Amino acid sequence: MLLTGDTALVRVFAVRADPRLAALWGFWAADAAGTTVRGQPGSVGDMDGILFGQGARGQVWAEGGMVFSVIAQGGPDELLGQVVASLRVGTAAELEEMRLGPVAREPTPADVGCPAGALIVSANEGAFRWAFGLGVDPAFPDLGWRTCARVINPDGFAGAGSGTLDPAPLGQISEQTVGAAGAPPGSEGTIVGGVAPPGTEHVNIAGPTGVREAVLLPEGLRPGERLFGQYLLGPLGPTGISGPFQITALDANGVVIATLAL
């Protein structure tokens, strides 16, 4: 288990093994006399000789048929002790919740490969999550609108794509399609994202497998516009996307504001 923060990194290892392994593992701690950890004989101290490099500090002990080590780099010693004291046996439900964490939570621009401050539209699609983002890279503003898209699986981040988007004149639809590489077998499709014109309350996207309403954000990069996105199932063609697609932006009364055929 890897715990990361702004100034510290903590690695937690748990192995079902002979408890005598703790003594061998604890050899690498600068603790000749040994130290009690969680009521068990253990080793506590600097672990500069291990592969994690200078500044590593750890605690090693055996408990309940398991051998544990908690190794920190950076941060105060109190952080290391807090992690050791907080360890407990988890449940199968908690493990599944942890595994599904990347799918359950809203992704950040960094998760999707977007520039800082980018707008992200995202939703679950069965056992995975898709995300589409749009922003301007503050380090390279002259490059204009930057897009990013990603498929997020329970085991981590999978297929991704990025590029540029030339904004259509205000009042029209700007779009980009990205083949969803990394989607589970049988769930292949295309992420369709873009910007809808001012006054839009709904965006419908018609694709090879039917019509879906897009997910809308309240804002876009220009005043009044709204970022939209949706995942559409369909076999990926030679270009790496499915299609064709018809995008329709409608107002609150269902009146068509703009359409775009891809």
Image (cartoon, rainbow, N blue to C red):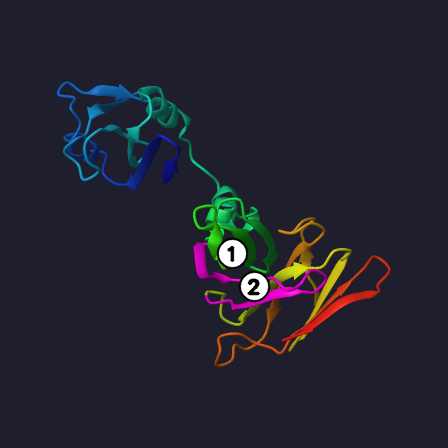
User: Is residue 64 in sight in this rendering?
Assistant: no
Circles 1 and 2, Cβ within 8 Å, touching? The answer is yes
Q: Amino acid at mark 1?
A: Gly
**Quarter-of-image position of residue 130:** bottom right
Q: Residue furthest right?
A: 253
Query: Farthest bottom residue?
Result: 238
Task: Say which residue label 1 marks.
Answer: 144
Query: Front-most of 86 and 150?
Result: 150
Q: Answer with mark 1 or mark 2, whichever residue precedes in sequence.
A: 1
Residue 111 colored magenta? Answer: no
The N terminus sits in image quarter: top left
The total of numbered circles placed on residues is 2
Camera sees residue 217? yes
Residue 209 % position (x, y): 66, 76
- Work out whether 207 lies above or below 33: below
Residue type at mark 2 is: Asp
Left or right relative to 54: residue 210: right
User: What numbered label is drawn on residue 166?
Assistant: 2
**In this picture, is 168 found above or below 60?**
below
In the picture as drawn, the residue positioned furthest to the front comes out as 142
Determine whether the residue tagged by mark 2 lies in a helix, strand or loop: loop
Which class describes the residues within 10 Å of circle 2: few (<14), some (14-19), or many (20+)? few
Which of 9/27 is in front? 9
Magenta stretch bounds: 153-181
**Element type at marker 1?**
loop
